[in-house]
Image: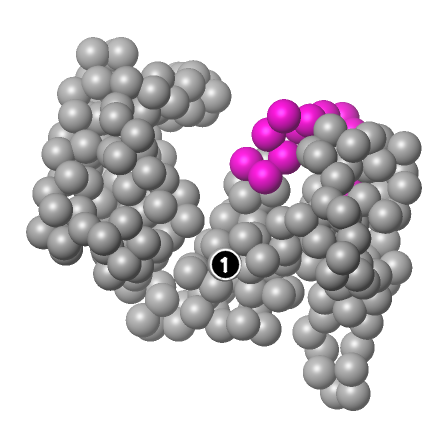
Amino acid sequence: MMKKKIYVTIAGKNPLYRVKALIKCRKEEIRLDDSKIVELYLSRNESAISQTAHKYGFRLRRIANNILNNNESAEECENDTYLEAWNLIPPNEPRTYLFAFLGKIIRHISIDMCRRNSAKKRYAMFCELTQEMHECIPGNSDVMREVEVNALTESIDTFLEACSLEQRNVFVRRYWFFDTISEICKLYGYSQSKVKTMLFRMRKELQIHLEKEGYTI
């Protein structure tokens, strides 16, 4: 197991840290493809961390910051994500889905931090999104004890594959990246009413899809 102290760097009395403060990638450095980065992890080459930070650091911090609305906390979550990735690769080998693998890690870490900190505004936002998804996805019920989470994930993926690209983009931005409605509107040039209507209809359609798959909402 990699020890956190290998990557911690402390500036003055600031207890927060970032991997990239210790292992810097030059701006002109060529970004490796995911398969080669994963090979670095598998060979226990510590440059895997800097290569990951160079390629995906900004996008990972954005996910964390959308949840926490705090740059320093987002950077801490980013650092913890690299540590977790180091400990999970191997046995995992996400050669073709590295960003999704990292994104899942940083979302969980950031949500846990949000719950611990209980910053009212951000926690309220997180609860709002959770409530939206509770309309169509089973929670901590008997169903979840009886059915593998992976099976539920596959069912949701199947639903999204049947949606249009426009629908998938909006759904993922809202529930994976935690973008606000306003941010989605700005990104795609949609009106707020269009985005809200699209998400509402997709949640209802997802609910019907899952019920047909045997889930009880």
Residue 29: x %, y % from top left: 78, 53
In the rendered structure, the answer to whether residue 136 lies left or right of residue 13 reads left
The reply to whether residue 80 is visible in this rendering is no
Q: Which residue is mark 1?
A: 62
Task: Count every numbered label the image shows and give the total.
Answer: 1
Residue placed at 82% from the left, 30% from the top? 39
Residue placed at 40% from the left, 43% from the top? 176
Outermost front residue:
28
> Badge 1, how many Cα within 10 Å: few under 14, some, many 20+?
some
Outermost top residue:
213
Q: Main secondary structure of the magenta part?
A: loop
Which residue is at the front of the view, 105 or 142?
105
The kind of secondary structure element at disc 1 is helix
User: The N terminus is located in which quarter?
Assistant: top right
The residue range painted magenta reads 86-100
Residue 108: x %, y % from top left: 52, 47
The image quadrant of residue 115 is bottom left
Q: Amino acid at mark 1?
A: Arg
Residue placed at 19% from the left, 34% from the top? 203
The image quadrant of residue 40 is top right
In the rendered structure, the answer to whether residue 140 lies left or right of residue 27 reads left
Q: Is residue 11 above or below residue 119?
A: below
Residue placed at 16% from the left, 20% from the top? 208
Q: Is residue 88 magenta?
A: yes
In the rendered structure, the answer to whether residue 4 lies left or right of residue 108 reads right
Residue 133: x %, y % from top left: 26, 40
Q: Is residue 189 above or below residue 211?
A: below
In the rendered structure, the answer to whether residue 163 lies left or right of residue 53 reads left
Residue 16: x %, y % from top left: 69, 74
